[in-house]
Image: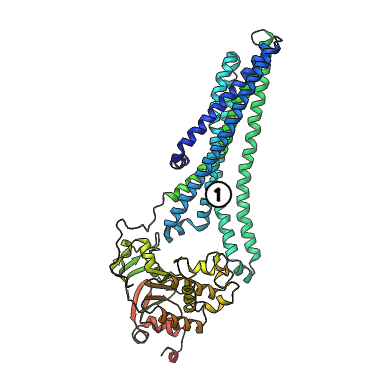
């Protein structure tokens, strides 16, 4: 997965990568040449007492060192820039894929996991790419080159490499094989701690209201301790790795000095050659150490790449039409024919054979018990989900054949739990229509019964709104969300229990203003409160996902027992009449 992800997203930067490899090659060759020059200075300059040779070779060493430094800086600069660009592109790809997801895919992954995959997981892949450009490219060049140069200095002494390198490789392989599953577990536990933290921050008022601080603290401690345990296990393995590698390096150096000293004493090897061989041996082992450092990071990056690819490979269940159709008219007529909807893995469908008609200038209400499928029914219109059977028509055209952007101009939905973005009142109202004027914003606020409290806020339309609208009350948040839909000026308004936080007086005033100011539009209202929908032109009664009655309030009170039970659970017989 990691290789596939890198190959896909590094393709546009192949020339930059080729330049980094070239710089690393030159830098490695310069590094390999320096011990040989040092050996020549010792054998031909210091031992022979030739000062001119020392000065000449020393100048050459200085020039080679400057080339090495320049290439190293250039490789790090261009490698870092390419790695950061890779991270940016992968984050962008994940972001755009998630934006294409329907509510079904978002629910499958979960918001905390998607956040972790977009941030922490991408960071792990980005870091491996950076280390590859700065360490992994030079490691094999240094390793192979140092072995060849060591053989050039003394072949019998080079036989030590046949023992040292396999031992080092075996130690690294053993430790890395134990680290890989722990890194996968670590990423899952980061998901978990993000989920707990997000829930506790979002639900802090509920936690304090029910005095659940202690239990929530314990829940966070459990998630935190689980992450701590697996991170500690990984840390212990890393603690074993580097001392083990250094032990092998030091033992190899001692063995080289021992055997090399005997060769010098017998006259078969010079002092400079032994010094150069020792340098090349250290370079071989250092290249293995650099590869070891990469092996430490690669398992976690592999786990992260798998999680990223899982998101990128997920095909959205709601896809744009291949040949978009533009409705011939813009009336806002909504029709559902034998609509079914079934969640994946659910035992029974949420909606069964639903038929519904809502015309322009009419208010259609949908009512039913909890879990009867009211919200799901509304979500099918703007294609937050797609019906598993039947068709949803807007102005006579199946919504699955209408261009997504076009459908967004025709339909506006005010969800059950309205969400406001961080910014200002104006930026939230202009979310669906950036060119709306201030006068249009005030008009929408007046219709939504929100003008009074916005005028009292410091700055009016420029008053700040916190993320999620947490600095306004629930009723104010609902009214601002309704005003945002009105500014959008669609042909179809979908209100999903959007008046539940309003008092009866505000509810009545808002419904009267909507009937007056958007009289030509199609309005579909889902509500639990009977007083909100009793004056609708048409009321659709849902029970266990099926339509069990359609008509006006008076007609349903007489002929539909399900509706009558709902009404009498809230009103007396006289009030209902």
Q: Which residue is drawn at 56% across and 77% down?
A: 455
Residue 19: image location, x then y, percent: 50, 33
Left or right of 96? Residue 188 is right
Left or right of 347? Residue 177 is right
Residue 337: image location, x then y, percent: 29, 70
Residue 279: image location, x then y, percent: 64, 22
Left or right of 497? Residue 548 is left
Main SS, magenta region, reads: loop
Q: Work out which quarter of the rendered image holds the C terminus and state it.
A: bottom left
Q: Residue at x 68, y 15 (%)?
A: 54
Which is more toward the observer, 418 or 79?
Answer: 79
Residue 327: image location, x then y, percent: 29, 66
Which quadrant of the structure image shows residue 207? bottom right
Vertical relation: 43 (above or below) 303: above
Q: Residue furthest top?
A: 267
Vertical relation: 320 (above or below) 564: above
Residue 165 shown in magenta: no
Which is more toward the observer, 461 or 114?
Answer: 461
Q: What stretch is highlighted in magenta?
A: 328-332
Residue 552 appears anywhere in the view:
yes
Q: Residue at x 64, y 31 (%)?
A: 244
Q: Residue at x 42, y 60 (%)?
A: 104
Q: Kindly identify which residue carries mark 1.
A: 120
Q: How are the colours assigned in the image?
A: rainbow
Residue 180 appears anywhere in the view:
no
Callout 1: few (<14), some (14-19), or many (20+) C-alpha neighbours within 10 Å? some
Which quadrant of the structure image shows residue 300? top right
Q: Residue furthest bottom?
A: 574
Label 1 SS: helix
């Amino acid at each position: 997965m990691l290789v596939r992800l890198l190959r896909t997203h590094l393709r546009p930067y192949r020339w930059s990568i080729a330049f980094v490899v070239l710089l690393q090659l030159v830098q490695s060759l310069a590094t390999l040449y320096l011990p040989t020059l040092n050996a020549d200075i010792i054998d031909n300059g210091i031992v022979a007492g030739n000062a001119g040779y020392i000065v000449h070779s020393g100048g050459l060493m200085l020039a080679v060192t400057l080339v090495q430094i320049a290439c190293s800086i250039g490789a790090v600069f261009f490698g870092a820039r390419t790695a950061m660009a890779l991270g940016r592109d992968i984050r962008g790809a994940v972001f755009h894929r998630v934006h294409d997801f329907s509510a079904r895919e978002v629910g499958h992954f979960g918001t905390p996991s998607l956040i972790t995959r977009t941030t922490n997981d991408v960071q792990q892949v980005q870091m491996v790419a950076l280390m590859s450009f700065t360490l992994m490219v030079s490691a094999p060049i240094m390793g192979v080159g140092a072995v060849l140069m060591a053989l050039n200095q003394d072949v019998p002494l080079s036989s030590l490499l046949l023992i040292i390198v396999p031992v080092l490789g075996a130690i690294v392989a053993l430790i890395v094989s134990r680290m890989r599953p722990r890194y996968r577990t670590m990423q899952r536990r980061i998901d978990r701690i993000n989920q707990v933290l997000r829930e506790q921050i979002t639900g802090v008022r509920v936690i304090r209201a029910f005095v659940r601080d202690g239990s929530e603290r314990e829940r966070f401690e459990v998630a935190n301790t689980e992450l701590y345990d697996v991170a500690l296990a990984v840390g212990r393995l890393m603690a074993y790795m580097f001392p083990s590698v250094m032990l092998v390096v030091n033992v190899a150096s001692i063995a080289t000095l021992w055997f090399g000293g005997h060769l010098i004493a017998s006259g078969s090897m010079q002092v400079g050659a032994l010094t150069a061989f020792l340098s090349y041996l250290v370079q071989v082992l250092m290249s293995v150490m650099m590869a070891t450092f990469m092996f430490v990071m690669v398992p976690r990056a592999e786990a992260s790449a798998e999680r990223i690819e899982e998101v990128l490979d997920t095909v959205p269940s709601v896809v744009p039409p291949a040949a978009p159709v533009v409705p011939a008219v813009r009336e806002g007529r909504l029709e559902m024919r034998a609509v079914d909807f079934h969640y994946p893995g659910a035992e029974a469908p949420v909606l069964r054979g639903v038929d519904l008609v809502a015309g322009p200038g009419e208010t259609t209400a949908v009512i039913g018990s909890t879990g009867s499928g009211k919200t799901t029914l509304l979500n099918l219109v703007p294609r937050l989900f797609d019906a598993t059977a039947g068709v949803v028509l807007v102005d006579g055209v199946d919504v699955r054949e209408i261009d997504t952007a076009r459908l967004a101009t025709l339909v506006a939905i005010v969800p059950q739990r309205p969400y406001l973005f961080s910014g200002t009142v104006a930026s939230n109202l202009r979310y669906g229509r950036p060119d709306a004027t201030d006068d249009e914003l005030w008009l929408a606020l007046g219709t939504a019964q929100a003008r009074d409290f916005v005028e009292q806020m410091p700055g009016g339309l420029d008053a700040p709104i916190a993320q999620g609208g947490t600095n306004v009350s629930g009723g104010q948040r609902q009214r601002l969300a309704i005003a945002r839909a009105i500014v959008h000026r669609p042909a179809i308004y979908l209100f999903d229990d959007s008046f539940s936080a309003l008092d009866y007086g505000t509810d009545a005033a808002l419904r009267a203003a909507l009937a007056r100011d958007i009289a030509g539009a199609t309005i579909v209202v889902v509500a639990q409160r009977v007083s909100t929908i009793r004056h609708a032109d048409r009321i659709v009664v849902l029970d266990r996902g099926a339509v069990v009655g359609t008509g006006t309030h008076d007609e349903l009170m007489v002929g539909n027992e399900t509706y009558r039970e709902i009404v009498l659970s809230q009103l007396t017989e006289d009030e209902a009449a």
